[in-house]
Every structure is written in C-alpha cells, then in structure tokens.
Image (cartoon, rainbow, N blue to C red):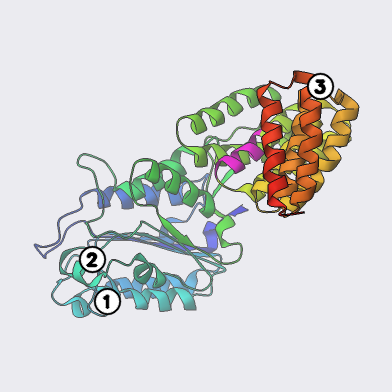
Amino acid sequence: MRLARGSNSHAVLIGCGSYDDVELPPLPAVRNNLDDLRSLLTGPTNCALPEARCTVLRDVSGPQRVGEALSRAASTAEDMFLVYFAGHGALDDRGLLHLLLTGSDTRLLGWSSLRFDLIRETMASAPARNRVLLLDCCFSGRAIEAMGGSASVYFGQLEIAGTFVLASAPANAPARAPVGDRHTLFTGELIRFLRDGSAAERELLTLEAMYRHTSRVLTAKGEPRPQRSGTGTSDQLALAANAAFRRLIPADVPEHLRRAVELGEAGDPAGALTALQALALQCDQVLGERHEFTLLTLRALAHAEGENGHEADAAQGYARLVERLVAERGPTHPDTLQARHEQARWTGVGGDPAAAADLFAELSVDASGALGPGDVRSLSCRWQHAHWLGASGRPERAAAAFAELADSYGSALGERHDDTRAARRNHAYWRDATGPA
C-alpha cells in the first residue's frame, strides 16, 4: 500500500456537462467534478501531481483532442496513468461503448463520440506500472435500445489487462446528479471519501477502499452498486492520505467498537465489517495481537464476518482468536471455551460438519472438565457435537450422543424440562434415521 508518485504519474480528467444534441440533458455538476478532483490529485498531502501532469478537458467537442491528450499523457506516465470521465455514455447497435462529448450526435455515434475501444488500447499500451480508470457515465438517448438489459455486456468492455477500473453501475438513465448537488452522485462520493477520509480505513485511501466506500454508501441509498475490476496489487495503490486517520490509542477502541456495532444494528452489516477489519488491523499493529482490546475486536470481527454471510471467514476468524486466547489465557479459560464454541459452530455452518463434530468432541471434554459435566455450557457443547455428528452422515453416533445427553439433561434439569424433551426428540429422530436394525 503506497501513494501514487505524482512526479512520474499523469492524470487526464475528461468531463462533458453540456451537449449540442438536444436529446442529451445537461450535467452542470460535471464542471465541479473536474475542479474538485483536480484539487485533490494535486494536493500536497495526496499523490501531489504537478499541475502539468493533471490534464483537464472540459466540454470537448470532438474525439481528436481527447486522443491527443491521452496519448501524450500515456507516454509520460511511469508510475500511474489515471483516466477519469464524467458525462453521458451510449452503446451502439453492436453493443460497443461510446463516451459522449459535447459535440456528439446520438444518431452518428461512430463519427462524433469517443469510442471506448480506443481508450482501452491507449491504456493497455501505456508503460505505467499502475493504470487506473474511473468512469462516471451511463447509457442515454437512443442507445438505450441497444443495452439488451445486460450490465455484463457493458462492463466486459471496461476490463483492461493490468488496470484497476472503478465505474458507476450501468443504468438506462442519465448520470445521476441530484438537483442542487455540487457533484454527480458517484463522483461526489469519491470526492468526499478522498477529501474527508474515513475512520474505518488505514493511513492511505487505496483504490480498493474507494470501491468499498462507494459500494457501501450508494447501495445504502438504494442506488446501483458500482463495479470494479483489477489485477495484481493495483487495488492497493492510494490516491490520497486518510484525513480521518489518527494513530490508535487504547482509549479509542471502545468508541470504535461501539460505532461499528451501531452500523450493523442500523442495517449496514457491510459497513460494520469494513470498520472492524480496519480496527483489527490497527489493534494488531499498535497494541499487539494479545492486547485485551485486540482480542475484543477480533471477536467482533469474526462475528461480523458471519453476519455478512462469510461463514468460512467467520470460522477462520474465531480460529485466530482461539490461538491467541490459548496462548494468553489457556485452552479452558471461559473466554477461550466460548471462542472455540463459535469456531466449531461456524465451521459446521460454513459447510464442514465433520470438522465441526470433531471440534465439538474435543471441546465437550475440556468444557466438562473445566466447568463440570452439568454446566449448561458443557451440555451445549455436547448438544452441538451430537447435532454435527448427524449432519455429517453419522446418524447412529448422533442417536447415541443424544440419548446420553437426554439422560444428563434429565438428571440436571428434570425429565419435564424443555431441553430434556428436545434431546429425547433428537434421539428419536436420529435413531429412526438409521433405518431398520
């Protein structure tokens, strides 16, 4: 992860907010897009592009001027070659993407617009180590008929080998620019992120972080999800320093955890996950992997992975937590036992019931020894062990385990207790599942 080196990089910012074709509505916010992006990219705390290495093209009438600027910039960029476009886009009757310029005529796309395949060729041939395409446009006018309802046709044209691409999602409407807003919707979120930063991110705002942010914020607003593609480590290139970053101190962690939890509770589990990933990394680096707050954060992160449907990642997260807790507090400490329980459970939920059964078998022995065989936590481990035995295709062993467990529940809680009855029902179910004797 590093900032792009401005001294041997070049950016070309292209924006068309006014159009001669009456079928193309104006996009007045595009001018502000260009001004503010240019300020950010040339800012001293960001990638600090020299003024001469940040070319801005406003309301260009024809494609020749754009082609000259792109070719010249591509030949001089060694570290990063960045191309940004904001305006209308269209597909011709063959499904080929065209970027519409001020003088473009929707009836004569091939003659009056900027063909995207020419941009592809220029970017693909550029010697820069990192090539970045930021595209804020969508289909409009007569070309809507050529869409065929397939976003993949559109985005497939954007994939350029060795290039990171971030694009506003294709849609059959003009680029979104709410009335009165300074920027178009997609670029506005990019600018706010690069300018204001995020407490959920690290010191530098990478291209991948830009995607995460715009994806989370725009989908939360009910807008289409931006699309991305990238190869190698291009997504770790940064365009700006994180203005919201502050070196972590232990006293900060509870507040960061509270904010992350509130994101999840407010209906943004992806945002909670992003915040916890960044916090866990900072805790590891600043506080150490065995610090109490690091362990708390790792526990919350593993839980968030599961809440986001990443069951295997949740299991791995709890496994990392278990390893640290065993080293710090021992294998039978209550905190360790709880983390082992979650590791085993998510292992099963993630699709490996046999491994879950094995983990719960070991855990049941340790929990019974540490807490007592009648403790509710010990009984819970035995229940999970029996369940995953059955789920992994071993009904006879599951039936036997539930029979023993029902007797234990009966002794500890009484035969009429709900848990005892449930264990008896599970015993009967798995006994019947074994088939005739």
Q: Are marks 2 and 3 in contact (CB under 8 Å)?
A: no
Choose top left, top right, bottom left or bottom right for residue 380.
Answer: top right
Vertical order, 280 against 160 (above or below): above
- Residue 408: image x %, image y %? 81, 27
Choose top left, top right, bottom left or bottom right for residue 320.
Answer: top right
According to the picture, the residue beneath numbered tag 3 turns out to be 411
Vertical order, 164 against 115 (above or below): above
- SS at mark 1 in the image: helix
Alpha carbons under labels 1 and 2: distance apart: 9 Å
Q: Look at the magenta stretch and give its main secondary structure.
A: helix
Residue at 67%, 43% (x, y): give it. Answer: 429
Mark positioned earlier in the residue sequence (2 or 3) = 2
Vertical order, 287 against 155 (above or below): above
Query: Is residue 264 located in the magenta-colored stretch of the structure?
Result: no
Residue 318 can be seen in this image: no
The amino acid pointed to by label 3 is Ser
According to the picture, the residue beneath numbered tag 2 turns out to be 60
Front residue of 290/235: it is: 290
Q: Are marks 1 and 2 in contact (CB under 8 Å)?
A: no
The amino acid pointed to by label 1 is Gln
The amino acid pointed to by label 2 is Val
- Residue 280: image x %, image y %? 67, 38
User: Furthest-front residue in view?
Assistant: 437
Choose top left, top right, bottom left or bottom right for residue 273.
Answer: top right
- Residue 286: image x %, image y %? 73, 35
Front residue of 391/279: it is: 391
Dot 2 crowding, Cα within 10 Å, few <14, some 14–19, many 20+ = many
Horizontal side of 382 relative to 197 (left or right) equals right
Alpha carbons under labels 2 and 3: distance apart: 84 Å
User: Furthest-left residue in view?
Assistant: 22
Which residues are the magenta region? 300-308
